[in-house]
Image (tube, grey):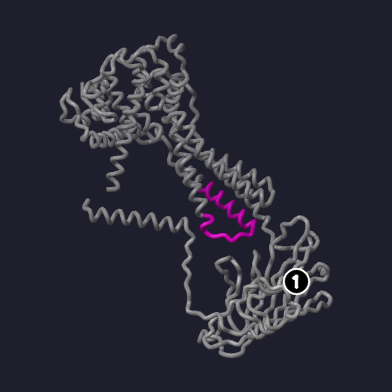
Amino acid sequence: MSNSKRSIRIFIEAAIVLAFFCLVFLNIAIPIHADTKTEGYELLRYEQTAEVRKSHEYAVSLKMTINAPKGLSSIDVNLPSGKYSLTGVKTSGCTGQAMQDGNGNDYIKLKPDDKNKQFHQGKSTLRVTYLIREYKESNPNYDMFLYDALPSNWDVPIKNLKLTMKFPEDFNLSDLQYYAGQYGAQDVANTLTYKLTGKKLVMTGSKLPSNFGITFKAQLADGYWEGALDNSWTAKLSVFLLGITLLLILQFWVIGGRDPKVEKTKEIHPIDGVTPADIGFLFYGHTRIRDIGVLIVYLAIHGYLKIVEYKPKKYTLVPLAEPKEEERYIRTAYNILFEDVYEGRPLEPKRMHARLRTVLKNVGVSIENGFSAPDMQACTTLSKVLRVVSILLLSACMAGTRILTMLYQYQEVTVTDFLVPMVILVALLFAINARFDSRYDTDERSYRFSMGLLAGLYELLLLAESLRFWMMSHNLVVCISVVVCGTVSMLLTLIMKKRGKGNAAIVNRILCLRSYMSSVKSADLARENLVNQEYYYEMLPYALTFSQEEIWARKFRWLGSKGSEFYEKVVHGNTMAIGRGQRRSDQVARDLKTFCRTIENDYHMTNRKRRVF
């Protein structure tokens, strides 16, 4: 690939990643500013009538008399601050649209309804009506009446003001108070006057400066407001959503996620017809470079080749004898590795990677053909689909529960509030499932640590969301439902990997062999006359496949290493062969483990460079 094509490819990939990041993780809103003029007009008279309703609603009728300059295209009517529902916006003499500023405060933008899109120069009257619906009180001791009759963010002075407040018949006016003025101003006695007649209060004023605010406040008996907006339904919906999700995932597992039942057997020798290279395909449905590394060790132990470490973690292979008695694909792998290489001559290290790629491809196809029966699937198509659907469903459920939590708190909700948690949970659940699937060929300590870390992070997210809801609602049912349903659903996705019946039978025998290798005691091996080099090395490739090479080697620690020189180290120019009495079995196992890991890591690193460059 030329440098120019390579640069274009890298640029396109970077642009795609950046675009995806911006779309998913950023809530991007591009403001469009029109050439509008909203200031410079005179507010000659401001008349507001607010009817306070028992359902904690304010039906507001506003009449404004303005003196508009030439070119005035819009007027912002500021509304009370806080969280509430604004509905029923109607206008006369203009058009109106409810909007929110950058701080989340509501306002109504008035625009002229003529073709020139400008208010008539001079005096005109504008009328606006709207309904404010407050949310249910959360204070258990009393109900609060708090109303900004004149918000303090008006930027225009008011020449004349008239406020009319109408209260319900059972409204207790004894605690009614009002606060008025600008920030820092104290005395407004000469500015405002009011008159209270029955349940009606009329307040008038004149020559009010800009940013002058008026707020009414009263403390009422607990439960006074009846029928206010109540989002407690979100708690019930959360429990319902979690329960339905759990039942659906459980149903998916019953339909297509359960493994066939197979009785356990005792396995102490390699299973006939199953080489170490077959195990990767039987477990995961494809052959990995890891399996090829173990296959090379298998060939070395049986005397077909020799592994030479000519520098620390730098290896080459030396052919010794063709494996004529082995499976056909093993013979093919050997011939590919040592094509045009004479016996006893090392394979050039720079040619090893390309040949390993060819071996992996050919061996993978051969093993797949050997286990091509329908009941030999490592994971059925149905269970794959159901697992993916379950992960997406669970992630959407948890993200939806978070949205319901925000609604319970009367917070504004955006698409990002749903997408970001869902993407995080999907990635986390896929990582947990991938780690769980690799448990059979991973070192137990490493597996427990990584799986505990991922599962702990997932549980921490559940507990955080549960605690968040508890602090807002003290609803224990929802909190328990989040943790229980989220945990059980996650566990169901882990075991939702159904194997074919034939595959399950072979895998069960392999797992029994793995269990035997990890749990058998040295005394038991001695009783069965298995403490010998032949048995140790016969089982060593399988121990490498299961990442139990050191556990297996410790059972034969004082046996010494194999006499045949299948592994050589070149130390400061001197060749040191692994031979009887020179190294212990656990040291041999560690060397072979390092070889397999180096082959795997170098292969992936080289492939990564090929993909990028």
Q: Secondary structure at mark 1?
A: strand
On the image, the x and y values in percent for residue 158 come to: 66, 82
Instruction: Give residue 411's quadrant in the image.
Output: bottom right
Q: Is residue 595 above or below residue 527?
A: below
261 with respect to 123 (left or right): left
On the image, the x and y values in percent for residue 588 come to: 34, 20
On the image, the x and y values in percent for residue 3 come to: 22, 53
Instruction: List the residue tagged with mark 1.
Output: 178
Q: Residue at x 58, y 66 (%)?
A: 104
579 vs 86, nearest the viewer: 579
Taking the magenta stretch, the answer to whether it contains residue 395 is yes
Furthest residue toward bottom = 122
254 with respect to 202 (left or right): left
Q: Is residue 495 among what the camera can see?
A: no
Instruction: Give residue 350's quadrant in the image.
Output: top left
Q: Is residue 183 above or below residue 386?
A: below
Q: Residue at x 56, y 83 (%)?
A: 40
Taking the magenta stretch, the answer to whether it contains residue 125 is no
Q: Residue at x 72, y 73 (%)?
A: 186
Q: How many marks?
A: 1
Q: Is residue 390 among what the camera can see?
A: yes
Q: Is residue 566 above or below residue 154?
A: above
**What secondary structure predominates along the stretch shown in magenta?**
helix
Query: Would you call the spot at circle 1 few (<14 residues within 10 Å), some (14-19), or many (20 or more)?
Result: few
413 vs 527, nearest the viewer: 413
Question: In the rendered structure, which segment of residues is drawn in magenta?
Answer: 392-418
On the image, the x and y values in percent for residue 321 come to: 21, 21
301 vs 210, nearest the viewer: 210
Kind of residue at disc 1? Tyr
